[in-house]
Amino acid sequence: MFYSLGFTPDSIVTSLGRMVYYTATTSPWISSEDKEAEKKPSLFFLHGFGGGSSAYEWSKVYPAFAADYKILAPDLIGWGRSEHPARDYTPEDYITTIAEFIEATCSEPIIAIASSVTAALTVRVAIEKPELFKGLILTTPSGLSDFGQNYINSLFAQIVKTPILDQILYATAVANPIGIRSFLEQRQFARSSRIYNEIVEAYLESALQPNAEYAALSFVRGDLCFDLALYIPQLTTPTAMIWGEKSQFTSPEMGERLANLNREAVRIFQKLEDVGLTPQLELPGVTIGVIRSLLKALELA
């Protein structure tokens, strides 16, 4: 896997298996004389879903915060280097294991920075267990069935529900370099020129892990979708949303509708021009700057 300088993998055991995460353990972030490392506030980076997703998604961003925060960036269950149980995944699987991960690694409320459907699931974790969170910064949070627009009814979701055909589609359309690059170009990036070989290789390595197809196909079938609009009004954690102007899944207008459901909690809505679903990969420098400004604006820094 691709590790950021000074970061190494560790793991904890959840109710669905072992979850691998990446944290700063060596120079230039940690030294033998660093007595204050464990006293830093915790900043979690949670990746979204899609063929080959993993903590790599945030790897160009989280090192910028390692001097001031305790960084934890997990591969969620079914993705990256974490365990891949052979099962049909549900939103409850991730709500449970995200909460278990936070409880196992931190004793104080954390700041979570999360992406897409995982960001929406993190909202639900924060509703169920608000004591775990100090703040949320969410990039394009969506349950993909928001305001009754049900992704499950789409033609592609129906096709992927066909046994055997789903495995063939995963092998031919996802778990190969052409499929990965096509997914990134069509679904995640506003400009294909910003996709370079390392990104494709990192996604491919994750997509080729044993049983990686189970979580990916659960996502593509729509098993992990829900209507986030039903949950946003219940949120109490201070929250900011970042929305790529050219997101292929949900528009900024949809994002503003979600934010407007609860302006007491969702205090900031920041639209980013000329980026798609994952600004953290497409324009990491800009994303770092925006996150820093949002941490200050939410009075979390």
Image (cartoon, helix red, strand yellow):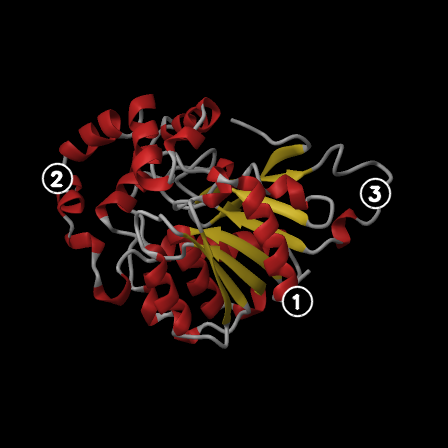
Q: Locate residue 243, reporting x and y percent.
A: 43, 55
Closer to the chain start, of discs 3 and 1, is 3
Task: Find the distance from the CA under tag 2 to the CA under tag 1.
Answer: 48 Å
Q: Identify the image quadrant of residue 205.
A: top left
Q: Amino acid at mark 1?
A: Glu
Task: Find the distance from the CA under tag 2 to the CA under tag 3.
Answer: 55 Å
Q: Is residue 19 visible?
A: no
Point 36% across, 30% down: residue: 207
Left/right placement of residue 228 relative to residue 64 reads left
Q: Locate residue 12, reporting x and y percent.
A: 56, 44
Local packing at callout 3 (Cα closer than 10 Å; few below 14, some 14-19, many 20+) is few
Q: Amino acid at mark 2?
A: Thr
Q: Nearer the viewer, residue 254 or 73?
A: 254
Q: Amino acid at mark 3?
A: Asp
Closer to the chain start, of discs 2 and 1, is 2
Q: Residue 299, which numbered label?
A: 1
Local packing at callout 2 (Cα closer than 10 Å; few below 14, some 14-19, many 20+) is few
Point 41% across, 26% down: residue: 200
Q: Quickly name the residue at label 2.
A: 162
Q: Locate residue 226, reporting x and y percent.
A: 29, 60
SS type, badge 1: loop
Check contact, mark 3 vs mark 1: CB within 8 A: no
Q: Quickly name the residue at label 3.
A: 34
Quadrant occupied by the C terminus: bottom right
